[in-house]
Amino acid sequence: MIALEEHLRARRDGGRKLLVPYVTGGLMDGWVHVVSAFVAAGADAVEIGIPFSDPVMDGPTIQEASATALLRGTTPESVLADLRGVDAGVPLVAMTYYNLVFRAGHHRFATSLADAGVGGAVIPDLPLEESADWERSAAEAGVATVLLTAPVTPEERLVRICARSRGFVYGVGLMGVTGERSALADSSATMAKRLKAVTDLPVLIGFGVSTPAQARDVCAEADGVIVASALMRRLLDGEGIEAAASLVASMRAALDGG
């Protein structure tokens, strides 16, 4: 398991803008090949969605991807079993909802992530006031708990979230759910500026980053971007792993100034 925060800090401090693409675990046969393709295309880490039936943070594309995976019989156990055979070469970060964590139990879930080589976890519906026990279990297993901030997060709470987050801080770039956007919300840059002013953790912005140009624009302020819906749409539409990886490669080139 590669240490998430150490890895991202080293790359950021070396002058690299960070790119973290997402894939829904169990979306299709051989889905783990998507992880390898994203890494080959320039990903600095890969976010793995563990599908849940009520993904409240996600828009239509990720909802569809989650439903597709669940209809195929995907479970948290099957996603993690698949990942045990993957040597990605970059950190893996799980994204899922607290119902699944609670059902498994904090210690068991954290340990299962670590055993599968997953070094970070994003649990968007677990509020700061209720997350301490999970954070302890995750830390004991060597899993970084990545916390989220929103455009409406008050300054005092923003500081507390940054102090507790590990790995990186996930800045939500707009109010609403995940999904492709034709234009970036101004709140993306504002969110990045606010976070950079109060933390030295890597600051990554997600929600709505859909094109290479948008990724480059976000990274004028942020340390990196998380990209999900634009990639899953290509897979759901049958364009194949190559098409999704090509978008990752185009974003990598844009972030590198190409």
Image (tube, grey):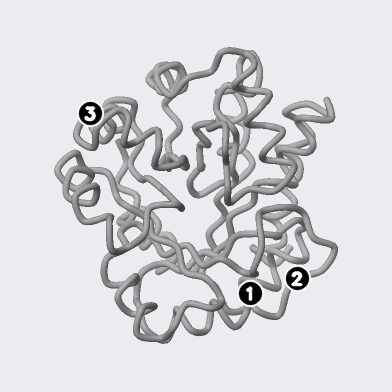
Residue 98 vertical placement versus 214 (above, below):
above
Name the quarter where the C terminus is drawn. bottom right
Q: CA distance from mark 3 to mark 2?
A: 39 Å
The residue drawn where x is 28% and y is 31% is: 109
Q: Nearer the viewer, mark 3 or mark 2?
A: 3
Residue 245 vs residue 131, the one in the foreground: 131
Q: Assess disc 3: are there few (<14), some (14-19) or many (≥20) residues with their C-alpha within 10 Å of its C-alpha.
A: some
Q: Assess disc 2: are there few (<14), some (14-19) or many (≥20) residues with their C-alpha within 10 Å of its C-alpha.
A: many
> What amino acid is labelled 2 in the image?
Leu
Query: Is residue 25 rendered to the left or right of residue 199?
Result: right
- The kind of secondary structure element at disc 2 is loop
Residue 9 vertical placement versus 33 (above, below):
below
Picture coordinates of residue 210 (x, y %)? 75, 56
> What amino acid is labelled 3 in the image?
Arg
Query: Which label is found at residue 184?
Result: 2
Tag 2 and tag 1, C-beta contact below 8 Å: yes
Q: CA distance from mark 2 to mark 1?
A: 7 Å
The residue wearing badge 1 is: 188
> What amino acid is labelled 1 in the image?
Ser
Query: Which label is found at residue 108?
Result: 3
Q: CA distance from mark 3 to mark 1?
A: 35 Å
The residue drawn where x is 74% and y is 41% is: 61
Q: Nearer the viewer, mark 3 or mark 1?
A: 3
Task: Answer with mark 3 or mark 1, whichever residue precedes in sequence.
Answer: 3
Count the marks: how many?
A: 3
- The kind of secondary structure element at disc 1 is helix
Picture coordinates of residue 214 (x, y %)? 74, 66
Picture coordinates of residue 4 (x, y %)? 34, 50
Specify the quadrant of the image occupied by residue 231: top right
